[in-house]
Image (tube, rainbow, N blue to C red):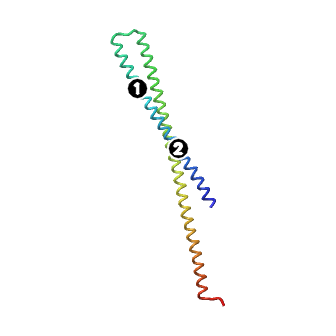
Amino acid sequence: MKRAADLAVLLELRQRQRDDALTALAQARRERQQGEQQLEQLHAYAREAEARWIERARGGVSPTLLATHRHFMARLEHATQVQRQTLEQQAQRIARCEAQLLEAERALATLKRLQARRAQQWQQHQARQEQKANDEMALQQHRRQHHPTP
């Protein structure tokens, strides 16, 4: 019976690992979604800034203002590139989390199959023991009926 208890502890551990993997995957996906939202905000901000610039430039601008705008747009483009790299890293993290979850689910399923097999073996063992006891009782009853003791 100790083996069943050991298996229960191992099952609990594997379930906890699977749950942790699910939590990590959910967190990675949330972070990815937030990163995508931030990237979209950067794109929207760049579009707005460019539209404002075009409107302002129609009236003429100084070389200093033009240089400032170009510098600002370059910094905004740099921020966009950094955010894209972050999204790439988040995608890789999601892939790793998915692989860890898959492995945790496989390990848990393997243990559950082992547990089911052991339970079936135990039931078969119990059925054999019961049959053996019934056979022994029937034999003793038969002996008493056909060979009474003097």
> Toward the viewer: 90 or 10?
10
Q: Residues within 10 Å of mark 2 (few under 14, many from 20)?
A: many
Residue 46 at x, y percent in the picture: 40, 22
Earlier along the polypeptide chain: callout 2 or callout 1? 2
Number of marks drawn:
2
Residue 105 at x, y percent in the picture: 51, 49
| Residue type (three-letter) at the residue carrying disc 1 | His
Q: Residue at 60% of width from left, 59% of height from top?
A: 4
In the image, residue 102 sits, relative to residue 52, either above or below, namely: below
Picture quadrant where residue 140 is located: bottom right
For label 2, the SS is helix
Q: Residue at 39% of width from left, 25% of height from top?
A: 44
Q: Residue furthest left?
A: 58
Q: How far apart are marks 2 and 1 (CA)?
A: 33 Å
Residue 126 at x, y percent in the picture: 57, 68
| Residue type (three-letter) at the residue carrying disc 2 | Ala
Give the residue at mark 2: 21
Picture quadrant where residue 80 is located: top left
Q: In which quarter of the image is the C terminus?
A: bottom right
Q: Residues within 10 Å of mark 1 (few under 14, many from 20)?
A: some
For label 1, the SS is helix
Q: Residue at 42% of width from left, 15% of height from top?
A: 69
Give the residue at mark 1: 43
> Toward the viewer: 100 or 145?
145
